[in-house]
Image (tube, rainbow, N blue to C red):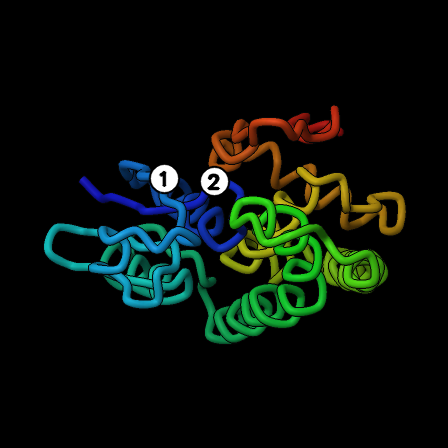
């Protein structure tokens, strides 16, 4: 049995959870609170960060390292694409969402609103929230652009690029920070992602004291 140490409303943990289900793999989910630096987590990952995947005696830290490991250890269902060109595009877009979008949007909204709350490190800074709210419009427009000429973000099949994008947007959407009216194509793509069985457990996560919008777990918005 695989074990995954995770934070339910963390985009990188959600990325791994979705990937596991798309590959037909079952993992025991162990919720952790990295901001408290628990000893069990520190022993597995000196950075005291989630996600951490345990597969027998193998321990893998970091969401990208974990998805790389899953591709190598469980290749029966591939998530990068069938052609070299699509695999290259998938990797480019995963980096886009996990690095560029994370830096310009997720870190500014999710970290300010939720991580600070969990770690009891003060209140969100309004200027940071405004910047994140402005930046997300560009990323939604880019998703819309990609989806106009493709069935999925990296090509004609669902890949890790879609998973990474959906993981970030699912957290932002939980907080009500996604202006879906900005880009109809992005909304249509995300509705298709929400209808996948791999997304259903993610969309059932709830944070005490903070409810998501009514459309949050509705595949039809």
Label 1 element class: strand
Alpha-carbon span between mark 1 and mark 2: 7 Å
How crowded is the residue under tag 2: few (<14 C-alpha within 10 Å), some, or many (20+)? many
Q: Which residue is at a point 44% across and 54% down the rendered structure image?
A: 35
| 138 displayed left or right of 174 | right
Q: Which residue is at a point 28% across and 39% down the rendered structure image?
A: 27
Give the quarter of the figure containing the N terminus. top left
Above or below 217: residue 108: below
Q: Earlier in the sequence, mark 1 or mark 2?
A: 2
| 30 displayed left or right of 197 | left
| The label number, if any, that marks residue 8 in the structure image | 2
Q: Position of residue 29 (x, y in %)?
A: 32, 37
- Quadrant of the image occupied by residue 69: bottom left
Label 2 element class: loop
Which residue is under mark 1? 31
Q: Which residue is at a point 50% across and 57% down the rendered structure image?
A: 160
> Mark 1 touching mark 2, by CB under 8 A?
yes
How crowded is the residue under tag 1: few (<14 C-alpha within 10 Å), some, or many (20+)? few
Q: Position of residue 175 (x, y in %)?
A: 70, 40
């Amino acid at each position: 049995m695989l074990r995954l140490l995770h934070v339910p409303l963390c985009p990188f943990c959600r990325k791994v959870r979705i990937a596991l289900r798309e590959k037909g793999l079952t993992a025991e989910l162990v919720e952790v609170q990295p901001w408290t630096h628990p000893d069990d987590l520190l022993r597995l990952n000196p950075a005291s960060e989630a996600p951490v995947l345990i597969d027998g005696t193998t321990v893998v830290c970091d969401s990208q390292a974990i998805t790389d490991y899953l591709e190598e250890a469980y290749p029966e269902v591939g998530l990068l694409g069938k052609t070299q060109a699509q695999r290259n595009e998938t990797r480019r877009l995963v980096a886009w969402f996990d690095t560029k979008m994370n830096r310009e949007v997720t870190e500014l909204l999710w970290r300010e609103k939720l991580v600070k709350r969990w770690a009891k490190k003060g209140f969100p800074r309004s200027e940071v929230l405004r910047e994140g709210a402005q930046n997300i419009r560009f990323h939604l427009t880019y998703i819309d652009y990609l989806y106009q000429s493709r069935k999925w973000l990296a090509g004609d099949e669902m890949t890790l690029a879609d998973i990474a994008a959906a993981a970030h947007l699912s957290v932002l959407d939980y907080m009500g920070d996604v202006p879906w009216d900005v880009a109809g194509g992005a909304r249509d793509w995300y509705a298709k992602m929400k209808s996948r069985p791999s997304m259903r457990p993610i969309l059932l996560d709830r944070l005490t004291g903070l409810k998501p919008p009514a459309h949050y777990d509705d595949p039809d918005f």
